[in-house]
Image: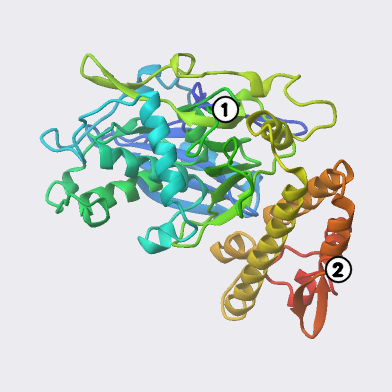
């Protein structure tokens, strides 16, 4: 086998430094090898809940890529060492820029659905209204479709596009090829189709392929930042963060309070998200809580760039040519001094926001996240009693909770800051801290107890720990 270690020009550039590893958004693959038959293997390192994973995608000549294998590692150093063994470092190659816009198909006589319309800003508004009217936490359970955090954003877009004959195109992790509604696998040609997307087996096969071959990282390159103001910030946009090997997540905007709408049971901005690993699950709803802004290369609040066909080839419209393109969220003056990023967004897009009600929304989100963590802890107690949950195993990734715990602690901190700057907030918060949240082995946990355990670093994220250790009681 001929092996090459990629000098990544389009997505991640791995640099081993004295102080650790630096990851820069530059490529769709971390390494690639090619055998004598011309079959390419693309290797991608993904951060999981506690450890790391190498996804291997293979692509034969004139064929679309496939997710061939995944390998898990407890540490980044172990993943990097395995990457070097898999791909070697005998020479370096540059990924060609034109690979980004290549959209191979295995059956040019068939499509997933025909393109009969083009995206416009009016269609974007219609998409947002459709999400507002149809999105629920049980959407993917109802239709028996597994998701992780990025899948929610991709799949909703593809469903709406298919319903209205609009084009869909996203770049694949690994090759960087564009996967479009006109990309057909030979194996899909004989799969039955149907007018109703829910019964269209070919379409559902394509959605599974999309989910298996995309990730949070490609959301950054497929999207663009836009003006954050009332009337432009709408449902169906997304918040995405990709910080290389160390942190990534994506959330889908499902509700935005409109001018004159008045108070609602929903928060002023509601997002929904899934988590890893990919599974059929209810989505988690949340108000918008983000402490800090991100770099432009790391994501932010974004919309999808539109696919367009030129000279018979698909490409994505340049970000700067998209409606309401703006880099304002990355500018130093976007947030006022001491202001959280999400508070700045709320101030700009919902001028008549009720900050006191937002405290209630935050308390509700804290309770929901604690209950969600409790379900993970209880399932871990059952699974880890009969199976290995050692670091590096799938079970360890499924049931460890370091990022959950970090997000919960961050949410507590953000709400405390909001309470301190909001008239009438202190009384609400004091009452909330006195509420019971869990009963752990006949010990009552109040909200104050959970906050204190988080502040002191007493919660255990290890799935092998006892129930009391998981909640900081031992």
Per the image, the residue denoted by label 1 is: 25
Residue at 28 percent of width and 32 percent of height: 166
**Horizontal side, residue 141 vs residue 203: left or right:** right
Rendered image quadrant of residue 396: bottom right
Q: Nearer the viewer, residue 288 or 442?
A: 288
Residue at 47 percent of width and 41 percent of height: 215
Label 1: how many Cα within 10 Å (few below 14, some 14–19, many 20+) = many
Mark 1 residue element: strand
Residue 428 in view, yes or no? yes
Which circle's residue, 2 or 1, is located before the other in the chain?
1
Mark 2 residue element: loop
Task: Please state the horizontal and vertical placement of residue 468, each as a whole percent of the image.
Answer: 79, 76
Front of the two marks 2 and 1: 2
Residue 99 in view, yes or no? no
In the rendered structure, find residue 434 and report the number of the disc placed on it.
2
Task: Please state the horizontal and vertical placement of residue 312, each as a whole percent of the image.
Answer: 20, 18
Q: Nearer the viewer, residue 187 or 369?
A: 369
Against 251, residue 433 (above or below) is: below
């Amino acid at each position: 086998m001929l092996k090459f270690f990629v000098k990544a020009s389009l997505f991640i550039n791995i640099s081993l430094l004295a102080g650790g590893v630096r990851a820069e958004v530059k490529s769709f693959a971390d390494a690639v090898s090619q055998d004598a038959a011309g079959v390419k293997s693309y290797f991608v390192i993904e951060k999981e809940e506690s450890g790391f994973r190498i996804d291997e995608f293979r692509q034969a000549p004139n064929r679309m890529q496939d997710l061939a294998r995944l390998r898990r590692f407890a540490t980044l150093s172990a993943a990097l060492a395995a990457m070097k063994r898999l791909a070697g470092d005998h020479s370096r190659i540059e990924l060609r820029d034109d690979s980004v816009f290549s959209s191979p198909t295995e059956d040019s006589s068939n499509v997933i659905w025909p393109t009969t319309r083009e995206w416009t800003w009016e269609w974007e508004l219609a998409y947002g209204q459709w999400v507002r009217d149809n999105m629920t936490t049980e959407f993917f359970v109802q239709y028996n479709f597994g998701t992780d955090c990025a899948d929610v954003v991709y799949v909703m877009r593809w469903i709406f596009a298919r319903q209205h004959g609009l084009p869909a195109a996203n770049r694949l992790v690994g090759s960087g090829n564009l996967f479009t509604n006109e990309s057909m696998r030979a194996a899909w040609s004989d799969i039955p189709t149907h007018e109703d997307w829910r019964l269209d087996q070919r379409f559902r096969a394509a959605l599974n392929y999309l989910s298996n071959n995309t990730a949070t990282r490609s959301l950054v390159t497929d999207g663009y930042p836009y003006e954050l103001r009332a009337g432009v910030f709408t449902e169906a946009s997304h918040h995405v963060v990709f910080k290389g090997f160390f942190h990534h997540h994506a959330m889908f905007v499902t509700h935005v309070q409109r001018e004159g709408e008045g108070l609602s049971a929903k928060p002023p901005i509601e997002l929904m998200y899934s988590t890893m690993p990919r599974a059929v699950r209810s989505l988690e709803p949340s108000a918008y809580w983000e402490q800090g802004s991100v770099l432009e290369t790391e994501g932010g609040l974004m919309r999808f760039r539109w696919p367009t066909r030129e000279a018979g080839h698909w490409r994505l419209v340049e970000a700067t040519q998209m409606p309401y393109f703006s880099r304002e969220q990355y500018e130093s003056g976007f947030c006022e001094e001491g202001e959280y990023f999400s508070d700045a967004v709320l101030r700009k897009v919902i001028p008549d926001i009720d900050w006191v009600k937002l405290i209630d929304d935050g308390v509700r989100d804290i309770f929901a996240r604690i209950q969600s963590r409790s379900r993970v802890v209880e399932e871990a107690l059952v699974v880890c009693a009969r199976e290995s949950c050692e670091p590096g195993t799938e079970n360890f990734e499924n049931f460890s909770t370091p990022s959950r715990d970090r997000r919960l602690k961050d949410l507590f901190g953000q709400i405390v800051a909001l309470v301190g700057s909001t008239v009438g907030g202190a009384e609400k918060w004091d009452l909330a801290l006195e509420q019971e949240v869990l009963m752990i082995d006949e010990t009552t946990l109040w909200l104050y107890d959970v906050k204190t355990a988080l502040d002191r670093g007493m919660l255990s994220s290890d799935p092998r720990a006892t129930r009391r250790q998981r909640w900081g009681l031992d």
